[in-house]
Amino acid sequence: MSAPKGDTQTAQFSVDLG
């Protein structure tokens, strides 16, 4: 999970979490 700071609520991160 290498998401940029402040971007933990993006769709990309959501997909990473499943």
Image (cartoon, rainbow, N blue to C red):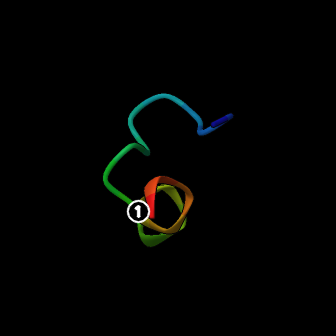
The residue furthest top is 5
Residue at image point 58% right, 35% down: 4
Q: Give the secondary structure at mark 1.
A: helix
> In the image, is residue 2 above or below residue 16?
above
The residue furthest right is 2
Task: Give the quarter of the image for residue 8.
Answer: top left
Could you tell me how many numbered marks the image carries?
1
Residue at image point 41% right, 62% down: 14
Residue at image point 68% right, 34% down: 2
> In the image, is residue 17 above or below residue 1?
below
The residue furthest front is 18
Relative side of 1 to 11, left or right: right
Residue 7, image x and y in percent? 43, 45
Q: Which class describes the residues within 10 Å of circle 1: few (<14), some (14-19), or many (20+)?
A: few
14 vs 10, nearest the viewer: 14
Residue 11, image x and y in percent? 43, 71
> In the image, is residue 12 above or below residue 7?
below
**Residue at mark 1:** 14
Q: Assign the N terminus to one quadrant of the image.
A: top right
Q: Residue type at mark 1?
A: Ser
10 vs 18, nearest the viewer: 18
Q: Assign the C terminus to one quadrant of the image.
A: bottom left
18 vs 6, nearest the viewer: 18
